[in-house]
Image (tube, grey):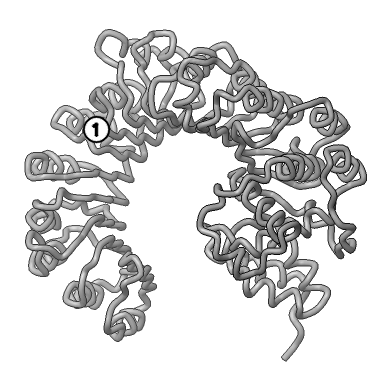
């Protein structure tokens, strides 16, 4: 067998980037693969195999040990000045800090340093360390906070970090020694940052050192980060009545900002100020916005939103304040949305669709009513190709049918209210537009209101020639038989996705039979 060309290995290893165990095995093969696999392992080292859960406590302690071996002399001197002694670890083969690209949360680093302290100072065994269920029972702050500061200093200078989540307790700047550590940064790889997430939910908000430290951190971000493309501000409940001007300044200086998410559990002065100041800056690249729980009745806020001519995608969740009294502001806007998510707001979707949403390609809403359906049909019948309706019930069933049959949809996703699922699916097929290729059914559970006959009627009466079907629920083998019969009669069918949430089918032979028809089947 001929040897693989070097250029093939990076492609192969990228497919393994979420499989840490296999990547660890790869680094033992030879030097070439080791050099390629190490950056993938250390791109986001605090994750487990599925990249969702953190690594275990013992692994995280070893990770910190490796990072500490990469500290510069300045950072080691800082730790000595703070009374923290660390061993002279052997110099690692790689400067692992250089490979970090993503740190979405500060908590993993906080917990990992604590694990290292327990391992190094208190001689915890691997089993004892992994057996800890509550990390908050320990107080090692005198050692832990300087360690965290030194690690962030190193990572800010060395890493290729592109995604960073910051919070109010991320750094602890208590004295001039702490401040000097970061003031000495003559350059910073933070300039590569493209996604900034600001978390401001912390029970110790009242501590002056936390507020001072967070203000200092924002100053660092403001100084070095000018290429951010995506900003998310989340969990602002603790700052409901407190302005943080540096957040606004950070956003304002991002000339190539593409996406802005303002996610807050209730009305907030920071969110208001950001919206208010949108019209006073040039955000010509800003194309996506997400806004939660915000009162837009203040005309100046709505004017700020409507000033973003480049806006193409808008997600409004639990917002209020747009009415016939101020909708003219949107009517006068040059915005032409392509994508709208409109969920649980206190005003009708028609106010958006009839103004800045006349050319929608994609729409998701749980607020379909007769007026909205008429406006969608009137304004978007030629442009709308992807539609997702959440919570179809018997009251909106006819409105829903009358709408979709008039559209040129390529993709349709629906979820029905539980008690009406069977009846709605029973009549859905004959109302599907001929253009439809992709159908997704969410919340499809085999309870009393849904039978195999309902599902069979859906597919047998289907006007469209489907190429893909996605089902989210706990359907049984009988449903799969119906799908198989449909596939045998429709040879252009290409993919079947079933989300069973790990339950699986007792008999997978039908899936094998389906694959023989050239259909790609994915069961999650």
Q: Relative to residue 448, is residue 522 drawn left or right?
A: right
Q: Quadrant of residue 143?
A: top right
- Residue 430: % across, % down: 11, 55
Give the position of the N terminus as an image quadrant.
bottom right
* Foreground residue among 76 and 242: 76
Is residue 416 visible in the rendered image? The answer is yes
Q: In this orientation, which residue lies closer to the viewer: 374 or 88? A: 88
Residue at left offset 62%, top offset 20%: 252
Give the residue displayed 31% in from the left and 72% down from the top.
503
Instruction: Tell me the quarter of the picture where residue 518 sits.
Output: bottom left
Q: Which quadrant of the figure contains the C terminus? A: bottom left
* Residue 152 image point, x, y percent: 74, 42
The crowding category of the residue bearing disc 1, from other C-alpha atoms within 10 Å (few below 14, some 14 to 19, many at least 20), is: many
Indicate whether 22 appears above or below 254.
Answer: below
Q: Is residue 254 visible?
A: no
Residue at screen point 32% across, 64% down: 499
Q: Which residue is mark 1?
A: 376
Residue farthest to the bottom, as pictured: 1
| 262 with respect to 227 (left or right) | left
Q: Is residue 126 above or below residue 241?
A: below
């Amino acid at each position: 067998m001929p040897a693989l060309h070097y250029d093939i290995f990076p492609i192969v290893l990228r497919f393994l980037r979420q499989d840490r165990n296999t990547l660890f095995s790869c680094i033992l093969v030879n030097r070439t693969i080791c050099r390629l696999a190490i950056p993938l392992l250390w791109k986001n080292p605090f994750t487990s195999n599925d990249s969702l859960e953190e690594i275990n406590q013992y692994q995280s302690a070893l990770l910190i040990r490796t990072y500490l071996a990469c500290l510069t002399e300045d950072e080691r001197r800082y730790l000595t000045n703070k009374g923290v002694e660390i061993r002279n670890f052997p110099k690692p083969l790689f400067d692992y800090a250089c490979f970090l690209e993503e740190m979405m949360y500060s908590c993993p680093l906080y917990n990992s340093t604590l694990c290292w302290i327990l391992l190094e100072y208190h001689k915890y065994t691997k089993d004892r360390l992994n057996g800890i269920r509550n990390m908050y029972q320990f107080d090692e702050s005198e050692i832990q906070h300087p360690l965290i500061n030194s690690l962030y200093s190193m990572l800010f200078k060395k890493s290729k970090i592109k995604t960073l989540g910051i919070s109010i307790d991320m750094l602890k700047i208590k004295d001039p020694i702490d401040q000097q550590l970061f003031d000495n940064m003559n350059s910073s790889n933070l300039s590569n940052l493209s996604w900034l997430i600001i978390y401001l939910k912390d029970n110790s908000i009242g501590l002056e050192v936390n507020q001072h430290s967070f203000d200092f951190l924002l100053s660092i971000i403001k100084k070095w980060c000018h290429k951010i493309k995506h900003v998310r501000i989340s969990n602002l409940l603790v700052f409901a009545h407190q302005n943080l001007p540096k957040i606004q300044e950070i956003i304002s200086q991002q000339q190539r900002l593409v996406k802005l998410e303002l996610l807050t559990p209730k009305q907030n002065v920071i969110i208001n100020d950001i919206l208010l100041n949108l019209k006073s800056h040039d955000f010509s690249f800003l194309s996506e916005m997400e806004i939660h729980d915000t009162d837009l009745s203040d005309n100046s806020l709505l004017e700020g939103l409507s000033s973003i001519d480049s806006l193409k995608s808008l997600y409004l969740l639990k917002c209020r304040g747009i009415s016939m009294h101020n909708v003219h502001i949107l009517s006068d806007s040059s915005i032409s949305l392509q994508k709208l998510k409109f969920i649980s707001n206190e005003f009708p979707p028609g106010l958006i669709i009839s103004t800045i949403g006349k050319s929608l390609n994609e729409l998701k809403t749980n607020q379909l009513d007769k007026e909205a359906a008429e406006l969608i049909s009137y304004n978007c019948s030629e442009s709308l190709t992807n539609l997702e309706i959440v919570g179809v019930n018997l009251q909106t069933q006819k409105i829903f049918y009358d709408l979709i049959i008039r559209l040129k949809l390529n993709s349709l996703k629906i979820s029905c209210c539980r008690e009406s699922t069977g009846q709605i699916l029973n009549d859905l097929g004959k109302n599907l537009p001929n253009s439809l290729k992709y159908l997704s059914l969410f919340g499809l559970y085999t309870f009393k209101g849904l039978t195999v006959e309902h599902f069979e009627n859906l597919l047998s009466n289907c006007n469209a020639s489907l190429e893909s079907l996605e089902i989210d629920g706990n359907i049984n083998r009988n449903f799969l038989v119906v799908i198989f019969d449909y596939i045998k009669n429709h040879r252009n069918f290409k993919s079947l996705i079933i989300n069973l949430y790990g339950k699986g089918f007792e008999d997978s032979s039908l899936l094998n039979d389906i694959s023989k028809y050239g259909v790609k089947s994915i069961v999650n």
